[in-house]
Image: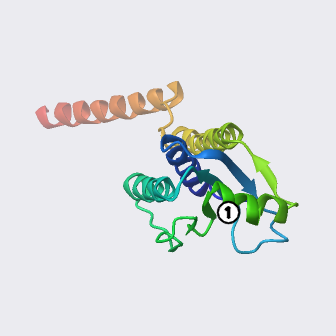
Amino acid sequence: MPSIESNQLLLAAAAACEDKKAEDIRILALDPAESGLTDYFLICNGTNERQNVAITDEIELRLKREFGVYPNSVEGRRQGEWILMDYVDFIVHVFSAEKRAFYGLERLRKSATTISVADLNAAVSARITETRAKKTTPAKKVAAKKTPPKATPAKKTAAKKVVVKKAAKSAARRSTAKK
């Protein structure tokens, strides 16, 4: 299962695609048995090569600014017809409409599951809430253990008896010293 951070990176990349008016944005969750190289494909297309470069520039800038993450490699930026960005846990494919129809990655990855951005966002939110709940529960137990126990009435009376005995002894000494 991909980490919360990698899913957040994927969501940020998809948001960058949307902001640059990419068309037909799809997230494919790849079958782990079939694809050992990555967990997701983010696939979209632009209307021309300049828009494709702008989309990939926005993805790279946003992930660098928000998460401090750079792609391992970028291929095809110079031509702009099919740009591939490798972020290890996911790979971004930005196509021209013609190249996307020609190569048909969605057809090649039949075992992959298409995930909507809303579904992925809901899954990330649920996992973050679950993680926070796990972290706060042990802290409450530890805090309860660290609080000192309240003094019971029996301990207070024992302490009073010791004080009374010491006072009686010192009074006895004074009276013997006077005689």
**Residue at 63%, 65% in the rendered image:** 89
**As rendered, which of 29 and 26 lies closer to the eye?**
26
**Residue at 46%, 26% in the rendered image:** 157
**As rendered, which of 92 and 77 lies closer to the eye?**
77
Percent of width and height locating residue 64: 40, 59
Percent of width and height locating residue 34: 84, 71
Q: Quadrant of the C terminus?
A: top left
**As rendered, which of 20 and 163 lies closer to the eye?**
20
**As rendered, which of 7 and 47 lies closer to the eye?**
47
Q: Which residue is mark 1?
A: 99
Above or below — where is 131 with respect to 109? above
**Residue at 80%, 67% in the rendered image:** 32
Q: Quadrant of the N terminus?
A: bottom right
Q: Residue 110: which quarter of the image? A: bottom right
**Residue at 53%, 42% in the rendered image:** 21
Percent of width and height locating residue 47: 56, 49
